[in-house]
Amino acid sequence: MDSKVKLYLKRARTEMNMANLLLKTSGNKILNDFGIQEDSGKILLFIYDSFINNKPKLNAQILLEETKWDGNRIDRAVKYLKGIGAIDIVLTMGNHQGVQHFILKKITPLGINAVEDQPEFKKNFSFEVNLDLLKFSWGASEK
């Protein structure tokens, strides 16, 4: 993996860890030990799978239907992926059940590297993935 990509991902992890600490110490329960990072990893895998299998580009409605998650949960994960540069999206006016409307332009090279470099994926998203066995079990539990 390119050294610039590693540095960028390290910086994003540091910023996310600081945000986790701040929210945990303030008593806010938006994030748990995994929270946004884990959710973001699952959504990034779904986007990656859609990309390599030439499926239609995702939008808020598709993510809500597939994951069965609360819209705000999806919104946080998508904006986190945008923030770390893993996906290129354009945020548009309005929302669908709490997910701001967006146009997914592409998964970026950084996003592809994050998925395909499995040790790096585990560091960034707090769980392991085997790309040969990529299947989705969203676990509709509320976070």
Image (cartoon, rainbow, N blue to C red):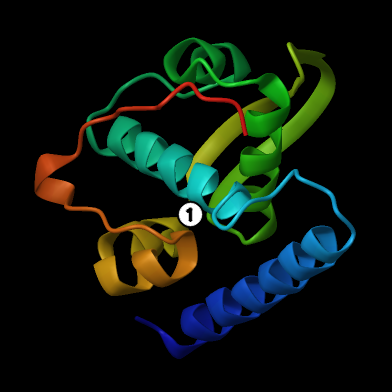
In the picture, measured across the screen, residue 100 lies left or right of residue 27, that is left
User: What amino acid is labelled 1 in the image?
Assistant: Thr
Q: Position of residue 55 (x, y in %)?
A: 31, 22
The picture quadrant where one finds residue 77 is top right
Q: Is residue 87 positioned above or below 5 on the image?
A: above
Q: Is residue 72 positioned above or below 85 on the image?
A: above
Give the residue at the far left of this rendering: 132
Q: Is residue 79 positioned above or below 113 on the image?
A: above
Q: Position of residue 141 (x, y in %)?
A: 51, 25
Q: Residue at x 65, y 80 (%)?
A: 11
The image quadrant where one finds the N terminus is bottom left
Q: Residue at x 79, y 16 (%)?
A: 95
Q: Is residue 24 positioned above or below 140 on the image?
A: below
The residue pinned by badge 1 equals 108
Q: Position of residue 24 (x, y in %)?
A: 78, 60
The picture quadrant where one finds residue 23 is bottom right
Q: Residue at x 46, y 38 (%)?
A: 43
The image quadrant where one finds the C terminus is top right
Give the residue at the far bottom of this rendering: 3
Q: Residue at x 65, y 20 (%)?
A: 70
Q: Position of residue 2 (x, y in %)?
A: 40, 84
**Total label count?**
1
Q: Are there few (<14), some (14-19), or many (20+) residues within 10 Å of tag 1?
A: some
The picture quadrant where one finds residue 20 is bottom right
In the picture, measured across the screen, residue 46 lies left or right of residue 9, that is left
Q: Secondary structure at mark 1?
A: loop
Depth order, front residue of 11/2: 11
